[in-house]
Image: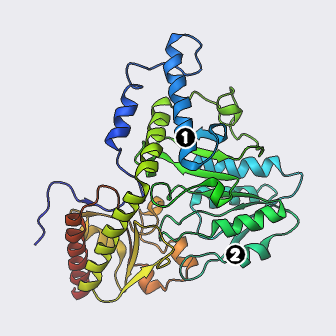
Amino acid sequence: MKNRAQYPVYLDFNATTPLDPVVVEAMQEFISPEFGNPSSTHFYGIAPRRAVNKARRQVAEFLNCSPSEIVFTGCATESNNLAIKGISMALKHRGNHIITTLIEHPAVLEVCAYLRRNGFEASFLPVDEHGLVDVRDVERAVCERTILISVMHANNEVGTIQPIEEIAEIARSRGIILHTDAAQTPGKVPVDVKALGVDLLTIAGHKLYAPKGVGALYLREGIGLEPILHGAGQERGMRPGTENVIGIVGLGMACELAAQNNEQDARHMQTMRDLLHTGIEKAVRDVRLNGHPEKRLPNTLSLSFRGIEAGRLLEEIGPYVAASAGAACHSGEVTISHVLAAMQVPGEWARGTLRLSTGRTTTREDVIFAARVIADAVNALRSS
């Protein structure tokens, strides 16, 4: 039955994306021959410095902001740490209260937990059965000590898109800083910082067909924060250390490509996702969709199979399909993820959850094959 080429079908684009060939080509020049330090004042620093400035413009145009509002970092985790710790320390004279949600990435949850151990307070808001936070809960959680709200743009596991624009209205009316972790959304849905109304926004290179080891933080003009690293004055002193020119060039080009192809890519990913979903549902009983049915990333499909253990299912499909069980950063063990727990997905369903995510390169043949493999594996495990 299973008849596939050398490599499994890749359906884990929310974990990481392959490098776009155009991105690779743009990076190549700064592997060799343009190896210089962009901070150098001599000849060898000129091209790298211009390349970093160009990438800053590319990212800024993609996010609809000024180049001076972009800070390059090492990854989305670093951007989240810089945003949350940096604002908290800068505004601690005004208050010590942070609002976030129960379904954030650990790069937000663990930062808030750290701050709680160091004199800050944090409110972790619930979500509904679709993974959606209630804007009224955000408003009720605000108090006179609140200095920061951090709510992800879209969830990495179930894809639910949060009402950031409405939360921004609350934050603005109360003089509270708003940060969103948008690691999953660029290239899938529009990411316009002015339309969203956010003060800080995190992006990750490797979720956007750029390399691992590079990210960016949008920091709205006029917002001050405390650096979490100390050294020389790179990135306006917000992120000291010699810039990762190769990665930054890759991120800049990836943002330019995403800006050109956003709608087309989103339509393709959604078509592939829905074809995959339909194929599985036709062949398997007792399948549950997790996440909001409409307010969801176009590429993300979280499915629970009642009575199945996701780890066993991944073992069965592993030679043919690459997917995740629960959140990608915690896929080593089959446990009920904090996201599914917050959504109150019953254990008999939650333990059998796969996250399947499509991408630009996903083909119709890929998803038809993958749907058949997954359905056959589920049915075989149930019969045994």
**Mark 1 falls on what kind of element?**
loop
Relative depth, front residue between 234 and 222? 222
x then y, percent, for residue 283: 23, 84
In this picture, residue 213 sits left or right of residue 380: right
- Looking at the rendered structure, the number of numbered marks drawn on it comes to 2
Q: Position of residue 73 (x, y in %)?
A: 58, 40
Q: Is residue 46 left or right of residue 276?
A: right
Q: Could you tell me the amino acid type at mark 2?
A: Val
The quarter of the picture where residue 49 lies is: top right
Pointer 2 or 1: first along the chain:
1
Image position of 172 with respect to 223: above or below: below
Assess whether mark 1 and mark 2 are in contact (beta carbons under 8 angstroms): no
Question: From where the camera sits, is residue 122 visible?
Answer: no
Residue 90 rendering spot, x and y as whole percentages: 81, 46
Element class at badge 2: helix
* Residue that appears at 51% across and 11% down: 43
- Please state which amino acid type lies under the numbered disc 1: Gly
The residue pinned by badge 2 equals: 135
Label drawn at residue 74: 1
Quadrant where the C terminus is found in the figure? bottom left
Looking at this rendering, what residue extends furthest in the top direction? 42
